[in-house]
Amino acid sequence: MRCGPLCRFLWLWPYLSYIEAVPIRKVQDDTKTLIKTIVTRINDISHTQSVSSKQRVTGLDFIPGLTPVLSLSKMDQTLAIYQQILTSLPSRNVIQISNDLENLRDLLHLLASSKSCPLPQARALETLESLGGVLEASLYSTEVVALSRLQGSLQDMLRQLDLSPGC
């Protein structure tokens, strides 16, 4: 007698029934911990302390500033922009932070799916391609401003997560 896919599924059923979903509280705690870790990594980069996140720097307007109320989709979109900016920088300081942003976005997607929020695909930053000259001329300034503003945005996100943000 041949055992088809149904037999194999029935054989696995007892094992699958013991698997539990990750509690959403754990996902939210992991998200907050990762945000704190990224903020600590930014603090460890000494030259990021020299610029206020509210300061305007000519030519770097494409870097998002602080947003008062953030939904999960707005958080994801903001992180996608920062991730794209950081990956375009040649600095070794930002590689791990960029990887952490990817993981943070994955956690935000889990939070959104737990609330049945459809997160749209974050759209690419169209202006980044045209800013090659700006990035070449001011790599250091771009890194400092981006990390400073990212740090402020992450701290806002941390506060918003305590308030259980909407979609």
Image (cartoon, rainbow, N blue to C red):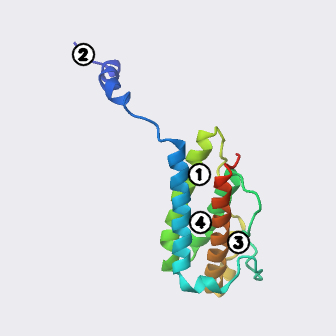
Q: Earlier in the sequence, mark 4 or mark 3?
A: 3
Query: Does residue 68 appear anywhere in the picture?
Result: yes
Label ID, residue 108: 1
Q: Return the residue nearer the eye: 127 or 85.
A: 85
Report x, y in % for residue 58. 77, 83
Q: Earlier in the sequence, mark 2 or mark 1?
A: 2
The amino acid type found where label 4 is placed reads: Gln
Task: Please report the residue visible at 48 percent of the width from the left and 79 percent of the height from the top.
Answer: 92
How many numbered badges does the structure rendering display?
A: 4
Could you tell me which quadrant the C terminus lies in? top right
Answer with the quarter of the image where residue 161 lies.
bottom right
The amino acid type found where label 3 is placed reads: Ile
Q: Are there few (<14), some (14-19), or many (20+) residues within 10 Å of tag 3? A: some
- Residue furthest toward the front? 162
Viewer-nearest of discs 4 and 1: 1
Which residue carries the number 3 mark? 63
Instruction: Report the Cα–Cα distance between label 3 and label 2.
Output: 61 Å
Label ID, residue 2: 2
Instruction: Report the Cα–Cα distance between label 3 and label 1.
Output: 21 Å
Q: Secondary structure at mark 1?
A: helix
Task: Please report the residue visible at 59 percent of the width from the left and 46 percent of the height from the top.
Answer: 111
The amino acid type found where label 2 is placed reads: Arg
